[in-house]
Image: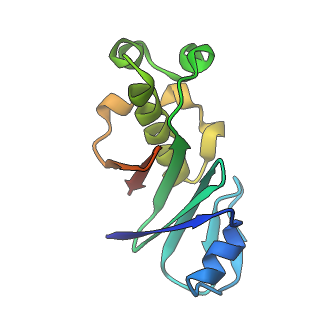
C-alpha cells in the first residue's frame, strides 16, 4: 500500500512538512532518508520543478522524470534486451524511472549500477503517467 503526494518547486523537507510529516529524518549509509521515530517508509524524487513523495507501509523507491530521450546514456544504463525494447521517448523514460525506483527501494541509489537492473525481469514496479512525467513506484 502506498500514497503519492505532489508539489511544485518544493524541497524534500518542504513537501514532507506540507503533508504533516514532521518527524526527524535520518539517512542510511547511501543517503536514503527514513523517519527516525515513525514506522512508515517514504521516498522522494524531483524532476524539473515537480516533486513526488511516496509514503508506504514497506520499503519504497519512487522516481519521477519529465518525458525525455537520452540517446547518449542508453548504452550506459540499459541491458541489451532493454535497448531492443526502446522505440521512443516514452519507452526510454519508463525504463529510466523503473530502474531508479528499484535502486532507491534497495536503499542504494544509482551507485548500485543502473545497468545491473533489468527492468524487464522485475515485477514489483508500477509506472504512472502524470502530465508530461512518468512516475515509478517500487515496493519491497
The answer to whether 43 appears left or right of 135 in the picture is right
In the picture as drawn, the residue positioned furthest to the left comes out as 123
Question: Would you place residue 117 above or below residue 97 in this image?
Answer: above
Q: Is residue 47 left or right of residue 6?
A: right
**Does residue 98 lie above or below 54 as drawn?**
above
Residue 130, percent across and down? 41, 52
Quarter of image, res 92: top left
Spot occupied by residue 64 in the image (x, y as percentages of width and height): 52, 49
**Quadrant location, the N terminus:** bottom left
Quarter in which the C terminus is drawn: bottom left
The answer to which of 42 and 111 lies nearer the viewer is 42
Position above or below: 13 against 88: below
* Way the structure is coloured: rainbow
Q: Nearer the viewer, residue 73 or 116?
A: 73
Q: Residue at x 64, y 59 (%)?
A: 32
Residue at the (43%, 40%) spot, across then down: 98
* Direction front: furthest residue: 131
Image coordinates of residue 68 in percent, x first then y, are: 53, 30
Residue 112 location in percent, x, y? 60, 37
Name the residue at 45% across, 63% down.
Answer: 59
Please tell me which residue lies in front, 58 or 46: 46
Q: How many marks?
A: 0
Amino acid at each position: 500500500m502506498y500514497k503519492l503526494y505532489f508539489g511544485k518547486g518544493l524541497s524534500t523537507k518542504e513537501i514532507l512538512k506540507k503533508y504533516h510529516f514532521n518527524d526527524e529524518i535520518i539517512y542510511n549509509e547511501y543517503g536514503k532518508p527514513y523517519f527516525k521515530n515513525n514506522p512508515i517508509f517514504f521516498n522522494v524524487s524531483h524532476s524539473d520543478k515537480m516533486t513526488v513523495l511516496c509514503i508506504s507501509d514497506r520499503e519504497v523507491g519512487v522516481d519521477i522524470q519529465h518525458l525525455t530521450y537520452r540517446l547518449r546514456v542508453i548504452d550506459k544504463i540499459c541491458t541489451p534486451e532493454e535497448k531492443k525494447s526502446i522505440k521512443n521517448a516514452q519507452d526510454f523514460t519508463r525504463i529510466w524511472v523503473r530502474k531508479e525506483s528499484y535502486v532507491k527501494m534497495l536503499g542504494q541509489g544509482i551507485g548500485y549500477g543502473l545497468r545491473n537492473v533489468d527492468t524487464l525481469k522485475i515485477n514489483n514496479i508500477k509506472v504512472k503517467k502524470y502530465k508530461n512525467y512518468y512516475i515509478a513506484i517500487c515496493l519491497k
